[in-house]
């Protein structure tokens, strides 16, 4: 099972003190964590700022190193479009805490792992 992690999914450990790799494993069993080059670039940009989001993005970048980083065949489009395209083509689940992205994925019948009550992860079936 492959699980694609987006930028805010990789920032959850700092923002909500949830160990995402352990929590995802508890939901789906053995899995391969995947992210996209566009997600890594987004985290790099966020990490250059200040404050809590920048700190979370820095941790997200280090967590992204535990993932297989895939190229997206789409270029010049928003990262969310890359995520939807990749998940649709490969059939992987997506871990995101972004409400708009979650709705787009569910509309395409793609399963989503999301934060529930700011403490645990849950699977929302697409």
Image (tube, rainbow, N blue to C red):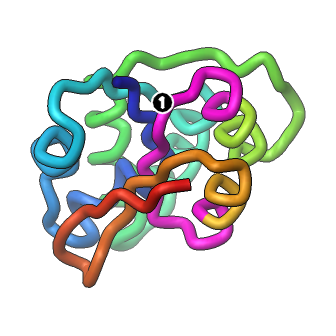
Residue 3 percent location from the top left of the image: 40, 33
What residue span does the magenta drawing correspond to? 86-102
Per the image, is 4 magenta?
no
10 Å crowding of disc 1: few (<14), some (14-19), many (20+): many
Q: Determine if residue 64 is in view.
A: yes
Q: Which one is nearer the viewer's eye here, 74 or 46?
A: 74
Asked if residue 104 is positioned above or below residue 20 in the image, the reply reads below
Residue 86 percent location from the top left of the image: 66, 28
Q: Which one is nearer the viewer's eye here, 48 or 96?
A: 96
Residue 126 percent location from the top left of the image: 56, 54
Residue 114 location, quadrant: bottom left
Q: Which one is nearer the viewer's eye here, 46 or 1?
A: 1
Residue 115 percent location from the top left of the image: 32, 68
Residue displayed at 65% across by 53% down: 105
Q: Which residue is mark 1?
A: 35
Residue displayed at 20% across by 48% down: 27
Q: Is residue 100 left or right of residue 10?
A: right
SS category of the residue bearing label 1: strand
Residue 120 location, quadrant: bottom left
Q: How many marks?
A: 1
Q: Is residue 21 left or right of residue 37?
A: left
Q: Residue furthest right?
A: 76
Per the image, is 98 magenta?
yes
Q: Quadrant of the N terminus?
A: top left
Q: Is residue 125 left or right of residue 108?
A: left
Residue displayed at 34% across by 45% down: 60
Q: Determine if residue 65 is in view.
A: no
């Amino acid at each position: 099972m492959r699980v694609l992690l987006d930028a805010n999914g990789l920032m959850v450990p700092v923002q909500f003190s949830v160990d995402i790799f352990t929590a995802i494993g508890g939901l789906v069993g053995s899995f391969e964590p995947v992210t996209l080059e566009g997600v890594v670039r987004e985290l790099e940009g966020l990490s250059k700022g200040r404050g809590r989001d920048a700190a979370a993005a820095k941790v997200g970048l280090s967590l992204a190193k535990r993932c297989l980083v895939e190229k997206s065949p789409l270029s010049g489009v928003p990262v969310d479009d890359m995520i939807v395209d990749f998940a649709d083509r490969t059939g992987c689940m997506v871990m995101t805490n972004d409400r708009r992205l979650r709705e787009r994925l569910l509309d395409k019948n793609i399963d989503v792992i999301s934060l529930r009550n700011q403490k645990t992860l849950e699977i929302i079936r697409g």
